Amino acid sequence: MGLNALFTVLLARKWILIQAVMVGALAALLVGLILPKEYRSTARVQVDSLQQNLLTGNFEPRVRVSEFLGQQAAIAGSRSVAVQVYDTLVAQGQLIESDLEAEWREATGGELVAGNDARLWAADKLLKKLEIEADAGQSTLTIGFKSEDPSQSARVANAFASQYMQSVLDQRQRRAARNAANFSGETESLEENIEQAQRDLTDFRQQSGIVGLGAQRLENSEVELAAVTMRLAEARADLSEAQSLLRQAREATGRELLTLPLSQEIASGRQAQSRLGSVLVQLQRLNDRYGPTYPSLIEADNERRALERTILKSVEDRAEFAERRVAALEANLQQKKTEVVALQETKQTYDVLSKRVDASRETYDLVTTRSLQEMLQSRVGVVDVLMLARAVPAENPFTPHIAIIIFAGAVIGMALGAASAVAFELYEGRIRSEETVARLLKAPVVADISLPKRAKPKPIRRAA
């Protein structure tokens, strides 16, 4: 149905539309007169979005602020808070307990069963008119209450805000007291750990025969080990040289001994080498002049053999000395290695025991400090929520004005009347336009003949 057709139908059935508007406006008027006026008062509470680390006690920003505010809103709208609000209002005389008890008996029959008593029923009745909104951006809770009395709505909203803050404080104090008790229990075991660690360190000192093991002692031993290692390398090189010289000396004969590279340490060998040169020259001269049987030649030859043995003996002694030196240095090196390894193990054990004592003391100090903090928090009435604005009696009612209610009823009646007019039109199948004829017959309209207006009948004049 097009827009023109709709207006045509509404114009043709205008009386249905007018009657529906009148009925809707009249019903809205009756509802507006019967509906009681309610006033809504709100109180704003700011909630600290920081959280405290249970171990270190440091405050850290919360990651999920909206989730935390949702939990706080659930606490503010809980039955336990509502029961406390009810008790406060009854104690202040703002609520009459006998009247509420009579209403409770009338509503529930007055049967006392688990979860059904006058206080809980009254608390649930207060919660039905309570509205709580959480704002994660400002970290605030808006606590609103609706009542027919503006002063009563403000009092109940403020009571809910105050009892919510008191509940948060009580919860924090109980948690702090519980944590303080837990930390106190841990303190005793930590004291025992410190004593045991100190005893282990003392026993190790006595067994090791040390009072304090510093880094210099181990460093000195490592330096000595490096020096012995260097000396051993030099001794092995010297031994290799001495053994090489010994092989040359054993293979050399006669004048070859004169060219042996003897060091300054082989003084006897160098002297014998010098004397051997003179003896060889003398032997050559005597042999050339007198022959091999000359007595002086035999004596010189004996001296030559003695000098050669002296040179060989001095080289052998030098090689043996180098071997003994290498063996002594190797033994000394092994001893130094054993000493350094023992010192390293001792230092490692000492460091472990010392660190255990330090760690036990640090843990004890931390737990003691946290226990003191939790104990103070359990005794100090400081809460991390703040009342930003108290609720005040509202000047204007929360329910809409009667004119708005009548207007809304008229609009609803108009919509229902229009729907009824269209339904009647479709049910009766009236034809009111060319488009309807073309759509029903599925053929073009050739001509449109308007219905002639009927002439009004003239009154008959009677003859006098």
Image (cartoon, grey):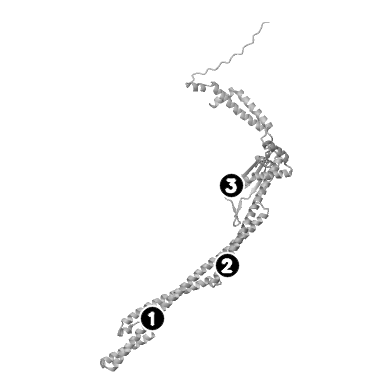
The secondary structure type at the circle numbered 1 is: helix
Q: The residue under label 3 is which amino acid type?
A: Glu
List x then y, in percent, for residue 297: 29, 92
Q: Earlier in the sequence, mark 2 or mark 1?
A: 2
Q: Quadrant of the C terminus?
A: top right
Image check: 269 left or right of 163?
left
Residue pictured at 61% horizontal, 24% vertical: 16
Neighbours of disc 3 within 10 Å: few (<14), some (14-19), many (20+): few
Q: Quadrant of residue 119?
A: top right
Q: Nearer the viewer, mark 1 or mark 3?
A: 1
**Residue 361 visible at all:** no
When the figure is inspected, residue 435 is found, relative to residue 334, above or below; the finding is above
- Label 2: which residue? 199
Image check: 241 left or right of 404?
left
List x then y, in percent, for residue 28: 65, 30
- Label 1: which residue? 320
Q: Nearer the viewer, residue 379 or 289?
A: 379
List x then y, in percent, for residue 63: 57, 50
- Label 3: which residue? 67
Q: The residue under label 2 is which amino acid type?
A: Arg
Residue pictured at 55% horizontal, 22% vertical: 427
Residue pictured at 61% horizontal, 52% vertical: 50
When the figure is inspected, residue 275 is found, relative to residue 194, above or below; the finding is below
Q: Earlier in the sequence, mark 3 or mark 2?
A: 3
Q: CA distance from mark 1 to mark 3?
A: 89 Å
Residue pictured at 41% horizontal, 79% vertical: 324
Q: CA distance from mark 2 to mark 1?
A: 54 Å
